[in-house]
Amino acid sequence: MNEHSSAHGHGEAAFSLANLLGISPLWIATAILIAVYALLITEKMNRAILAMLGAALMVILGILNQQQALAGVDANTLALLIGMMVIVAITSKSGLFQYVAIVSAKAVKANPVGILIMLTLITAVFSAMLDNVTTVLLIAPITLLITDALETKVFPFFMAEILASNVGGTATLIGDPPNILIGSAAGLSFNQFVVNLAPISAICLVVLTAIIYFMYRKTLSEIPEESRQRIMKFDAPGAITDATLMIKALGVLALVIFGFTVGHGYGIQPGTSALSGAALLMLLAYGGQNAEEQSESVHHIFGEVEWVTILFFTGLFVIVAGVEHVGLLNIFAEYILDLTQGDMMWTAFLIFWASGILSAILDNIPFVATMIPLIESTADTFGGPEHIEPLWWSLALGACLGGNGTLLGASANLTVAAFAEKAKQPIGFMAFMKVGFPIMLLTLAIANVYIWLRYFY
């Protein structure tokens, strides 16, 4: 996202309308940012509409010109998200994900506590390999199927899956949207994310699983035997509706992950790998159809892409570019450095806890998008971009783990909440926070120790 700083030179003419109104561009851009955030928190208006309106105002009021606005959009992030959404949409048509869930439930003899732990672990692993929003979109319907058969409330299961998706998503570049943003802006590779974040993600997952076990084992052990027998009768092989498609999808997914791990060294961005994989899988899945059927299939698959999320990101990038352009983020960066007196370790800790707590209150995506240019602006103080790597890992850990604090903390949380509402078992804001917030604080404390030992000890 640092390309748009090069567009800074065109900015003076862009301020014409702001000058005409006699108001400082800094105040206008800040007011737009605050208004968008405030409305985001109320959840009264769709986030894509909000972000697009905010972006439009940045250009119409002359904070940015159109060229600068487009330069502020991180195309790699959007390409990565769209590519992975297409791959998962096609893969899910094969029945692979339902198969995994049924096999897992049977592996623990349909023991409800065992199923809960199994779904928690599967969600975490899938969240690391796909991304957490995509994972919960796949796991939630399966969970409802299992809880219906068990005749039990879905809350403990959904709660565990939300927490696991954010913890598991922390581990890789593609696991959580904030990581995609950070990796793209800081030029960090897939491998670097795995090496730096997977160990602490695994530790937090073990802690989380233990807590979930002790919290819900009593309630779930009261489920009658006949409910368990119902699950044992599920037909796992029958869940796979298209074995050929499944093999093609797994092959393409392996190629894409190979592209993530190796591509960085050859200047191939993750977005390119994901979109290439999506195109290849569409060719393999629909290439044999006639022109009309092919158009219909492709149209249907693109319909499954979360365009609300994509347009939300696009608008958000423009808003953040505007705020950065008027110098607000530099003011904040100076304030942080004054507060920590330019000490790298305390700066990392401050960024970590600020991103943890604030990501619980706000959605972690807009928060991280705002923090990225702010961290970039500290590079000179610490001796160049290569020296601020611990700050990126602190931001990623804080934002991903902080997403577990409240229902608004991460997109995955809201996605699962939508499923719960459809199933007439809504997840209340306070009910979520009672479980999520203490667990978030515990995982943040563990991660803080990890940051200290890994980068500063």
Image (cartoon, rainbow, N blue to C red):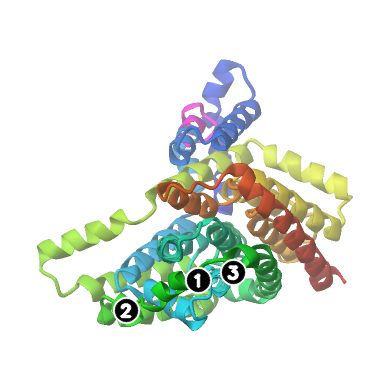
Mark 3 crowdedness (10 Å alpha carbons): few <14, some 14-19, many ≥20: few
Q: What residue appears at the point 29 percent right and 79 percent down from the top-left corner? A: 238
Return the residue at label 2: 246
Q: What residue appears at the point 75 percent right and 49 percent down from the top-left corner? A: 354
Q: What residue appears at the point 83 percent right and 59 percent down from the top-left corner? A: 344
Q: Look at the magenta stretch and give its main secondary structure.
A: helix
Question: What quarter of the picture does the C terminus occupy?
Answer: bottom right
Instruction: Indicate the position of residue 308 as horizontal and vertical percent values.
Output: 41, 46
Q: Earlier in the sequence, mark 3 or mark 1?
A: 1
Q: What residue appears at the point 56 percent right and 33 percent down from the top-left corner? A: 42
Q: Earlier in the sequence, mark 1 or mark 2?
A: 1
* Mark 3–mark 1 distance (CA, rounded to whole Å): 27 Å
Mark 1 crowdedness (10 Å alpha carbons): few <14, some 14-19, many ≥20: many
Region in magenta: 55-64
Kindly identify the amino acid type of the residue bearing the numbered disc 2. Answer: Met
Return the residue at label 1: 126
Closer to viewer: mark 3 or mark 2 = 3
Instruction: Indicate the position of residue 147 as horizontal and vertical percent values.
Output: 46, 63
Discs 3, 2 touching: Cβ within 8 Å: no
Kindly identify the amino acid type of the residue bearing the numbered disc 1. Answer: Phe
Return the residue at label 3: 221
Question: On the image, which quarter does residue 275 sit in?
Answer: bottom left
* Mark 3–mark 2 distance (CA, rounded to whole Å): 35 Å
104 vs 418: above or below: below
Instruction: Indicate the position of residue 452 as horizontal and vertical percent values.
Output: 83, 67
Kindly identify the amino acid type of the residue bearing the numbered disc 3. Answer: Ser
